[in-house]
Image (cartoon, rainbow, N blue to C red):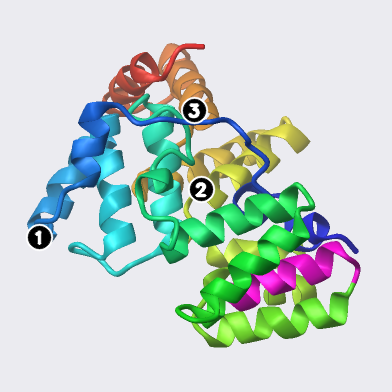
Amino acid sequence: MKYGLLLTTATTVLLSVTSCSQAFLSTEEQELHMMTVPVSHDSIAVLSERARQGDGQAYLQLARCYHDGYGVEHDFLMMWCMMQMATQYGAVSSSDAFLEAYPTSDPDRMLFEAMDDVGWKRYGEARQKADALAQCNKAYAALISGAIALETDSVSEALAFFRVAADGGCLLGEIALAVAERGREAVCDYADRMPMLYCQMARECFTTSVSHEEDERAAYYYRLADKYLCLDEVGIRWMHGYCEHKAKTGNPDADTTELTRLSILHSKLVKP
């Protein structure tokens, strides 16, 4: 049983990073990352509303807030979700560019890069980062060790490490254990804390069935992703078509306000 199969596509998106691009930050982005004034809860609400309208810079600032605990609790997964959305709207060149603005000793950066190493089977480099993390974040260190163990087919050892990570407050360790015990359906229980999972759940609905009920379920999941500011590009395009079809066919549930907003978001997506 390999690492990706155990955690399913929902978490391998985060943990089996395989990008090796050399990203860079613009001067404006560097200045943003130098921000030291704490962000208030009111500012979080303002940033969230701007992000809801497809403002990539607002997503970039929210990622910083979740990393540094400005106005919100530190949350690696929400930071990563906001970073993905900032990339979607062109506020940063790639998803890993954000963490490259932090020191190499930053725990979140070390976790991200260690999982990149695991994805590329650079286990020695990953173990070095785990050793460094053990001095400041034992839960992250255990997560990395568990990932290495699972990739090298030491499943029981991997689960023991994941339990240590979970007990230390690491959500990804908790997810790994839940999936091992209950299967991929367990991932759904964590969507509120990693909202991009809702997009994955929606895609599974409309790619496995063409029934009206499955379309309604997909729309339900995409709206939940939107609620948490994580409606991805596929979701925007699918929901736009879904709402447009409702409007054109005179469906009484058609929401012209939602369609207008989706059209705006669609226009702001980074063009290939």
Mark pair 3, 1: CA separation: 29 Å
Task: Determine whether label 1 and label 2 are within 8 Å by CB.
Answer: no
Counting residues from the start of the chain, the first of labels 1 and 2 encountered is 1
Residue at the location (64% across, 67% down)?
128
Residue carrying label 1: 40
Amino acid on which the number 3 mark rests in the picture: Glu
Query: Which residue in the protein does label 3 denote?
Result: 233
Q: Is residue 150 magenta?
A: yes
Amino acid tagged 1: Ser
Label 3, residues with CA under 10 Å away: few <14, some 14-19, many ≥20: some
Q: Earlier in the sequence, mark 2 or mark 3?
A: 2
Dot 1 falls on a residue whose secondary structure is: loop
Q: Which label number is shown at residue 196?
A: 2
When asked about the image quadrant of residue 175, the answer is: bottom right
- Can residue 230 be seen by looking at this rendering? no
Residue 168 seen anywhere in this rendered image of the structure: yes
How many circles with numbers are drawn on the protein? 3
| Residue 248 on image: x %, y % | 44, 12
Chain part drawn in magenta: 140-153
CA–CA distance in space, label 2 to label 3: 11 Å
Q: Position of residue 33 (x, y in %)?
A: 24, 45
